[in-house]
Amino acid sequence: MPHLSVNPSSKPNCSTVWLISVLLGLLAVHTNANDVLTVPQQVSLSTNMDSQQLSISWLAGAATTFDLMILRTELNESVFYETVSVMVSQLSGRHEWNWTSVEPLQCTSLSIKVRSREGQSTSEWSNTEILQGSDLPSEEEWQMFPLDRVVPVGANTTFCCIVKEGEQFGTINYGNTVMNTTRLSRRSYATTVVNQGLSGSSGTNVICYNSFKELKIGAVVFVGYPPLLSDFVCETHDLTSAVCLWNERDTKLYGPTRGTRYTMNNRTFTLNLKKECRVDHWEGNWTLVVVNPLGQYSLTDSAELGHRVTAVAPENLISVAHATNATVLWQWKYDGYSSLALVCQVELTSQGYKTNHTFSGVGLRAVVLPDLYPYEDYNVQVRCGAQQNFWKWGSWSETMSFKSSSIVPEAPDMWVWMNKDYTGQVIWKPLTRRQSRGLMTGYEVTLWSPGESLQHTDILPPDTFAVPVNLTQMATASSDNMVMATVTAKNTEGVSLPASVLIPLRLTDADPCAVSQAVYTDSGFSLFWQSDVNTTCAYVVEWHNASCKWNCPVDWIKVAPGNTNVSIESANFQPGVRYNFSLYSSSSEATELLQRWQGYMQELVPSSPVLSLLTTQEDSDILLTWGHIPLISRRGFLLGYNIYISSGSQLTLLANLSDPGSRSYTVKGLSEGSYKFTVKAYTSAGEDTGATASIMLEPFTDWLILEILASLGVTALFLVIVTFLCYKKRKWVKKAFYPDIPEPKLPGDWSRSQAPLDVKPPHHSLVHMVERPEWDSSKEALVVIPEEDEDEDGQGIGDELVDTDEPTSLRYYNQVVDERPIRPRYPDSSDSSASSLDSARTDVTYTGIQTSGSSFVFQLDPQGSSEGHQPQADPSFCAGGGGGYRPQMQSRVPSDDTGSASPNSFPEPQAASGYKPQSSWQMDSPVDDREGRSRASSLGSPTSIASTQFLLPDGEDHTEEKRQPSSSAATWLTNLLSSTKP
Amino acid sequence: MAARRTRGMTGPDVSRSTVARAASIAEQLRYECSILLELYREKESFTADVLVDGRLVSVAPPSSQLDTRDKLWRLHSALMQCRSLLERAIAREEEELGGGKKGDYETQRKMVKDRLSYLLICTGELLKTAGGAALLTPSLEGLELDGPTALFELKLWVYRIFKEVDYWTKTAITTLEALPSVIAKERVRTSRVRTTRSTRR
């Protein structure tokens, strides 16, 4: 400190004094300034290498503000240069300031100096203090810092590698990552790892390689978490000591140096595998502190002993088992439990199902388990807790097994299926293990008639659940109306109570009640019925496949009295199968069928189409008929039928028959052609595939018949009209077509004999017919007929063979001939006759519509002529004729000509191979129509024997058959005309 | 060489089956060693070319002058040192670096240690056979069993021990494969006896 010196012997001068004063003032100011900004002295350094902290202290009087400068010594790089405020430590009297380095302090040497500051004024820098690094030339080997550092997750750490003298730096790797490096000094290189992640149990390696990528040095860093605890609680098991438990996170830091250290109430302990702390005495308050290199954590707990009792597991469980209950006994590990009020839970497991029973009591060590199933395996576990101030359940004991005793089995659930006769089967459901209550040995089935004491018993093995029965013998031998069927089950302990069903012996085919439809829902078939309030009987609902009729596999369920509904569910139900459900009353009387249902679990489309689909033409309509679909194929309730007509591959709906009983359908309004029809039955699920039938629709034949009949009718009408006109104009007709024929003059009396008069005329002789207009038609006439064989077959005719060289004998018949004269339009008739005679095969005929024989020489009975459709032939006359002329109405042999014979009795055209009567016209024959018309003109006219007008050609034989039916009409017409003769 | 011979070798009389079994175990050990080294390199992010200088096991240098017994003795001594080093390495590793979840590396490490013990039993039997009733007690004196304190140095030390085990396993294979000449003599002698017997028949 500067000191001022004053000389008292000097004589003061005013100006001098003033000058001196100014100088002194300036000096004082200058002296004062140098006095405050003291240069820091005795700068010293101390280090904490693990925390990389540098502590700097110095002496600087009362100064409080300093400039600090830290440089890397070798490269003279500034690391830190700041103005800081530092107070004097009361203990040491020095200024102290701490600085934490980013790099480990060993990485390189640091130079530190300090100066005081007062505003803008600063003192001189203190002497530079150097913190020696490990990169001094004296330390030649490879080095790396920091070593074995433990850092929290997310920290940033700088590592440095000091290269061996004479070698070259390569890289620094953090794990597998090559890091960026910074040169700190000639031999020192640093890298900073930021946001470090968790490392493994052996840490993460930081490796320094030389320029040849050779591993030279390394360090390990462990990245983990500080400790963190939760759920710290202390409890007691033995009612004396404390066991403290907690949860903690994995710090990922292990080993004696990095791992967590524990203290309980300031007592260090080593963690066991259960991670719990045992304290011999109940202290009531506990503090747990855990520490690791990254931090510490502590938790506390406090409680009374009675509030923290966690019971130990009961030991040495034993049981005393009966059929329906068992006693379970156990022991406690600690004597203190004998006076402790306990609540215990017993878990009973049987067939996979668990049930819990809770018991309580002081020092509880035995309980009775009720409601056990006989002959059942059980597993039991027990755990307990303090009944008062319950804390939590203790541990479960070890599992103990026992088996309950067996007793007689339950009565089996039985039912009876009866067929339509007296056969059937007694069936029962297999007893479950629990129902068996022991080892089953068999069943006993008894049928007995109560009134007649008839009894039949079957003993069956235990795997039998049905037995066929035949009650025919009992039905005949017993006067009772019912038989009782009884089933008992037997096991090793004895026989069950009997199960019985009364079987009525009055069998009837009639269904006593209507059948309803049962609807299937998610819960099964829901069945409802009316209940009689006075009825206390139970019910039995029975079901089976509806397609089964004989010894059906039936299932049933028993319904308690008073119920009026039940849902039937079975794993055996299948879609598309109809099931019959029957509700029976179950009482001491015989079972009675009360109601019936039918239902499907799921309706499907029919599996097969209708049977026997037929198509029939009815008039112009088509009738479709079909049969039913078998029940098993319906697979649903039939709702009706759809009738389709197919055109090509497309089906067109013709009709929908909503009546499932329909079996036919008539398709109308179709024209001729081929049709194909398909009939599809449908259920609620849809249609079946359909049955198809085809038909060719043909024209309606009845119309043809009607047309024919109409034509005939018109023809008949025409004939009637013509007949009528002819009748009205008969005189004119007679005059026009039947003029009187002159009667020939014959000597003698010819009228007595009607036998043929055989005349053998001389050759070329002719009978000359003298036409005399005045001839009376009532007189007899003689017709000359040349003799010939009429029948070439010689069938009963012509028994006299005639030599053609001989003159042809002429036969004369006293025939009924028309009295009218031969028509004059045939003047050459005689010639023709003569020529016919020459041929010896000429028949002489008349268009036999003559009603009177007056024109012949034989007088005929006019009455007979008018009535008869055949002439009154003399038998003697007929006998002489073998094969000559035949009357038109007598086409058969003359021997059959008995006068009473009807001309219709001989319609055999074969017999007349030559001559045909006119009456055999076929008016409807188109072939003969023209010819018929030509003949019509000669109808009823006498014809010359020489005329060929009515001589039928040989080829007409085959037309005889056609003409024959008309002969009756011609005869009728002839008679009609004849009857007109006065 | 840190070992002492308690009794002289009586001559080459080595069981063929024991040699074969020892060779088989050595082969298996070599394979397991390779896996262990691979797991360790993977675990510690070491490259395959990490150089570890110097041998940890000290035995007599190999020489063509050594007879079978000496070869077996040398091998047996080296393997015993390997086992001691390996046991120590495992202990140090568990102490300093263990504590976490055990994985494949720890399993393989134990397997190698156990296999090495089996091999030692076989070579001990061979050595007994070769030396008659000779009792060999290779000394572990002077063996550096503590290892370094720095954890990275400790890891390198463990790696060197694994490499040493691998090296001496391969040496064991080589040594045991060199023994068939002895076995061949036995075989020739045995076949001669059989031939003589069959001729008599």
Image (cartoon, rainbow, N blue to C red):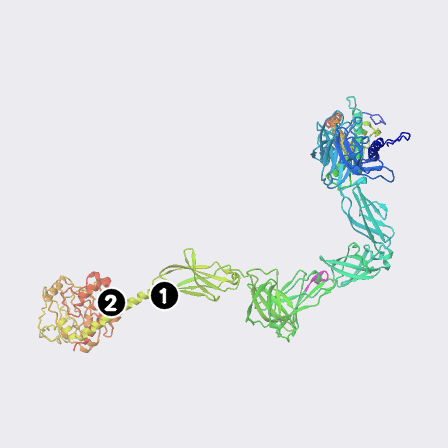
- Which amino acid type is shown beneath numbered disc 2? Gln
The quarter of the rendered structure image containing the N terminus of chain A is top right
The magenta stretch spans residue A442: yes
Instruction: Determine whether A639 is above or below B168 in the image.
Output: below
Which residue is more in the foreground, A783 or A143?
A143
Q: Secondary structure at mark 2?
A: loop
Residue A370 position within the rendered picture, expressed as x and y whole percent measured from the top left: 77, 63
Q: Could you say which disc has been placed on residue A964 in the image? A: 2
Which residue is more in the foreground, A633 or A532?
A532
Residue A470 position within the rendered picture, expressed as x and y whole percent measured from the top left: 61, 67
Instruction: Determine whether A120 is above or below A234 in the image.
Output: above
Which residue is more in the foreground, B65 or A839?
B65
Residue A249 position within the rendered picture, expressed as x and y whole percent measured from the top left: 76, 46
Residue A275 position within the rendered picture, expressed as x and y whole percent measured from the top left: 80, 47
Chain under label 1?
Answer: A
Q: Secondary structure at mark 1?
A: loop
- Which amino acid type is shown beneath numbered disc 1? Asp
Q: Residue furthest right?
A: A9
